[in-house]
Amino acid sequence: ALQRLLRELIAYANTATRHGQPLAKDPVVRRQLASLATDIEVLRMLFYRNGWLIREGLPTPYESALNKVFADETGQKLAALGMEILGLYGPLKEGSRWAKLHGKMQHVYQTSLGHTIAGGTSEVLRTTVATRGLSLPRESRARS
């Protein structure tokens, strides 16, 4: 889903203009899109690796937690960049005659924060990565 949305955002950047130039010619926009493309490809490889570990019957004590945190945060970055690139068109919902990308970006932007909570908060999942993946000690809990 992230890859598909990124492709749509790239297509928009190639056709939309700012100051008479396509947005895609802006070096900042190009760098941001390339950075997200890199993150999404890394994420794809992490998911494939996790699937391979499971198929081979190998333990996955922290991989799923790591993948979820990375996927959620990449989704948030993509949504924020999309809103920035779309500018005033970003918050428009599907059905608005001026909505770009069929109003998808506002929906992704509004729901991306909830993804860091659903299925385990990012903080809890980071603790899993720290303790199971990096063999770091557990955090001490505050006493009431």
Image (tube, grey):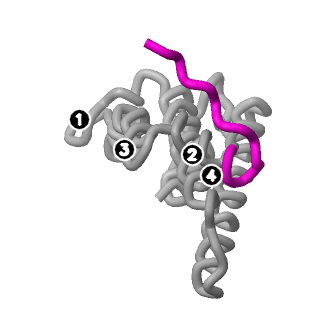
| Vertical side of 62 occupied by 113: above or below | above
- Disc 2/disc 3 C-alpha distance (Å): 11 Å
> Where's residue 44, x and y in %?
63, 65
- The residue lying furthest to the bottom in this view is 56
- Disc 2/disc 4 C-alpha distance (Å): 5 Å
Foreground residue, 104 or 55?
55
| Disc on res. 96 | 1
Instruction: Give yes or no for residue 139 being in the magenta stretch.
Output: yes
Residue type pointed to by label 2? Val
Callout 2 secondary element = helix
Q: Find disc 4 in the rendering and name its residue.
A: 66
Q: Quadrant of residue 85?
A: top right
| Disc on res. 118 | 3
Confirm whether residue 10 shows in the render. yes
At x 46%, y 59%, the residue is 1
Going from N to C along the chain, the mark reached first, 1 or 2, is: 2
| Disc on res. 69 | 2
Q: Main secondary structure of the magenta part?
A: loop
- Disc 1/disc 2 C-alpha distance (Å): 33 Å
> Where's residue 42, x and y in %?
71, 58
